[in-house]
């Protein structure tokens, strides 16, 4: 999933809302609207936010 995060094409200091919007665009229309896939969507968004937070920590730590 880290590869998917990298393909979102967002800067490291983007807001969480921007991450969610970019991740949402990566899903197909049926995946976004199907109630049966709600938990999978939540896991996907949470994982994207986790990768984003890790990237922010790395940049802050190494002052890139």
Image: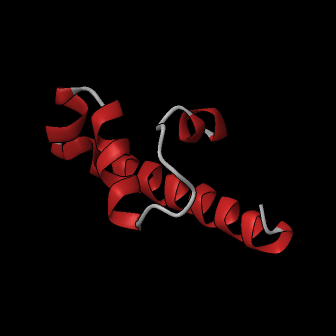
Above or below, 43 against 57 in this view is: above
Q: In what quadrant of the picture does the C terminus appear?
A: bottom right
Q: Residue at x 29, y 50 (%)?
A: 21
Residue 10: % across, % down: 47, 46
Location of the N terminus (image quadrant): top right
58 is higher (above) or lower (below) than 11: below
| Most foreground residue, 60 or 51 | 60
- Left or right side of 1 for 62: right
- Which residue is drawn at the image coordinates 38% and 43% (left, top)? 23
Q: Quadrant of residue 54?
A: bottom right
Q: Residue 48, percent across and down? A: 51, 52
- Specify the quadrant of the image occupied by residue 42: bottom left
Q: In the rendered view, tell whether residue 59 sits above or below residue 10.
A: below
Image coloring type: secondary structure
Q: Position of residue 44 (x, y in %)?
A: 45, 48
Is 63 left, or right, of 14 in this rendering?
right
* Number of on-image labels: 0
Q: Describe residue 45's horizontal placement relative to residue 63 as left or right.
A: left
Q: In the current view of this chain or complex, which residue is farthest to the right?
A: 62
Q: Position of residue 59 (x, y in %)?
A: 74, 64
Write the residue at 17% across / 28% down.
Answer: 29
Considering depth in this image, is 21 or 31 the residue closer to the camera?
21
């Amino acid at each position: 999933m880290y590869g998917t995060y990298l393909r979102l094409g967002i800067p490291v200091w983007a807001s969480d809302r921007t991450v969610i919007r970019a991740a949402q665009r990566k899903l197909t229309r049926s995946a976004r609207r199907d109630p049966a896939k709600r938990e999978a969507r939540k896991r996907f968004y949470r994982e994207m936010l986790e990768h984003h937070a890790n990237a922010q920590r790395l940049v802050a730590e190494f002052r890139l």
